Amino acid sequence: MPAAVRLERVAKRYGDHLAVDDLSLEIEAGRFVTLLGPSGSGKTTLLMMMAGFVQPTSGAIYAGDRDITRVPPEHREFGMVFQGYALFPNMTVAENIGFALRIRKMERDAVAREVNRMLDTVRLTSLGARLPRELSGGQQQRVALARALIFNPKVLLLDEPLSALDKKLRAGLQEELRDLHQRLGTTFIFVTHDQDEALSMSDEIVIINRGHIVQRGSPKELYDRPASHFVADFLGRSNFVDGTIAAIEDDAIVCSIGPHRFRQAAARGTPIGGVGDKVVLGLRPEKLALSGTEPADTSNRLRGEVIKATYEGADYHVRLATDIGSMQVVVPVWRSAIEPAAGAHVWLSWTSDASVILRDDR
Amino acid sequence: MSGDDRTARVYWLLLAAPVFLLAFLYLYPLSKVLWLSVTVPTPGFGNFAKLYTSDAIRHIVWTTARLSAITTFISLLLGYGIAYAVLHVRQRHAELLLFFVLLSFWLSVLIRAFAWLTLLQNRGLVNTLLLDWGLIDAPLTLVRNEFGVVLGMVHYMIPFAVLPLYANMKGIDPRLVPAARGLGATPGEAFFKVYLPMSVPGLVSAGILVFVFSLGFYVTPALLGGGKTIMIAEYIAVQITDTLNWGLGTMLATSLLLTVFGLLAVMSFFVDLRKVFGVK
């Protein structure tokens, strides 16, 4: 089956600035794919090129087998949800949702039927006669979705659709979006700078920085096995320690950092050269453990002094001073062997599969 | 005495001078005009009857209404294009465009009328060029007729059309047109189905402003009409300064005033007038 959307060596230049730089990407039909990156990374430009609002400087864009590089947006048959929704303020909810069908000269009765079906789908059944401004943010969001989906587009493009909503509402809508995606089977291409959103919703995340794809994969792959410093830093939090590769064994790589030697299980795709190479070791705060006495069963351990410990209900957030630098640790309260307090001397340890060796792209 | 009271007193004091000026230099003469219109030459509504009985006056009222309507229509058309362009070109170009729109505020209306006169008269620049190029055999009558009057009025009114339209269009979400196109609308459909309806309040505001100004416009029609195309303001001036027919002059002035109020009253059903005049 051909990809729902395929970008072939696409670039976009604004004056001296390369917003998207020779980027190729295939998006499989039916998936929920998130383009994730900091602001200015080029992710929105990328989406706007797929939608047809921005012309690529070079390269080609395909929908299935069809070359749509020069096709205007109205003939691409993609649904699009804009940041801030862009609902037509002078039309009722029903008129907004029916817009695409009226443009396609569908009969009035048929439009009304489809609009009602769509209103049910997004659970706004009785609100068709209202004006957009009379709805809450979450309801407006659902109108925007219904309006973009009513003509059964194969691909739905979403430009930071949840960024205007408060946190609680956002969680609810994330679930609804996932649900809608599963029911309709439409390909969703979702742009966001919010890593939590990306992790919880996507089948696949494409991380974009400075107009390039940095890494792509399932949320779990990206979180557990980030390939570079940028990815580890952008997705979740991490401690970063500079070190050198001291030895490569069958099942493990040994890193030397200061006076210490840490073992990391040899994992597929770890970007290392050979012994003596400089690397960055990434350590997720929640994969570290604290204990009052020296742990016996793990190979990676070092002493530290608690600088600051914050109780956050479910977790302790602890900042440690160690001889390889300051380390951030998150330990669940119910499982913590000790009650960390500033000034306490503790042991910090982690298993050999907790760390990850990163390409340094700082 | 509390501080609030003292502040209030200062405000009243600041207002005293303009209130005094308005009362004696504006409201008093205005009421005098209203009064004269029903008392001179004889008490009663004899002057107002002439609106129906006198062919000359009916002709002038009709000319005024017609030219004002044409001026309003053309000004809105051109103003819409300019306002749209200001919002859709690059920032630097937009600033330059707005500068040129506002520039005409600084040029005296008198100077502009004379400039048009110089350009458009029989031996003016336009006719000379057209004759030299052999495009015409005899000079075109471009001025001292309705064409000249409308041209001069449109030139004067364009900023008054552009500014309310610009203010209105600035409030239109720039993503609405892309949203419409994403839903399958061609650029034309997106404009007529989404953008134009959203800019109707701006068109109404600009339309009222230009039409009301046009109705009472004096200098430009007087100069470019050259005594042949006469609008009501010029006619009133003639009655009062030349023929000393105060009754007729004040009657027409009063009628003009009432017409404007009437128009505003009708429009207030459709738009919030406080927004039109920028009070809100």
Image: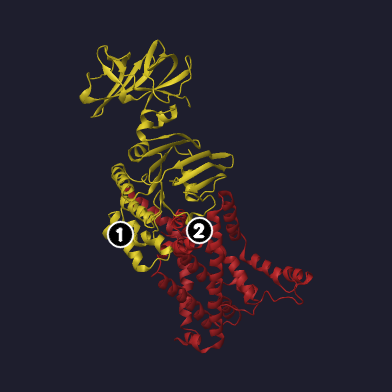
Chain colours: A yellow, B red
Q: Which mark is residue B86?
A: none
Write down the chain letter for disc 2.
B
Q: Is residue B186 above or below residue A70?
A: below
Circles 2 and 1: CB distance less than 8 Å?
no
Write down the chain letter for disc 1.
A
Label 2 crowd (10 A; few <14 / some 14-19 / many >=20)? many
Badge 2 is on which residue?
B166
Q: Amino acid at mark 2?
A: Tyr
Numbered disc in front, either 2 or 1: 1
The residue under the point 36% across, 35% down is: A219
The residue under the point 36% across, 64% down is: A111
Q: Is residue B131 above or below residue B16?
A: below
Q: Out of A271 and B275, give the one closest to the viewer.
A: A271
Q: Quadrant of residue A198?
A: top left
Q: Looking at this rendering, what residue extends furthest in the top direction?
A: A259
Label 1 crowd (10 A; few <14 / some 14-19 / many >=20)? some
Rendering coords of residue A357 (x, y %):
41, 22
Rendering coords of residue A256 (x, y %):
42, 13
Q: Is residue B22 left or right of residue B2?
A: right
Q: Amino acid at mark 1?
A: Arg
Q: Out of A61 and A169, give the one closest to the viewer.
A: A61
Q: In which quadrant is the C terminus of chain B drawn?
A: bottom left
Q: Out of A79 and A37, give the one closest to the viewer.
A: A79
Q: Is residue A241 visible?
A: yes
Rendering coords of residue B10 (x, y %):
40, 53
Q: Is residue B211 left or right of residue A124?
A: right
Q: Is residue B237 above or below residue B97?
A: below
Badge 1 is on which residue?
A117
Element on which disc 2 rests? helix
Q: Looking at this rendering, what residue extends furthest in the front direction?
A: A1
Q: Is residue B25 visible?
A: no
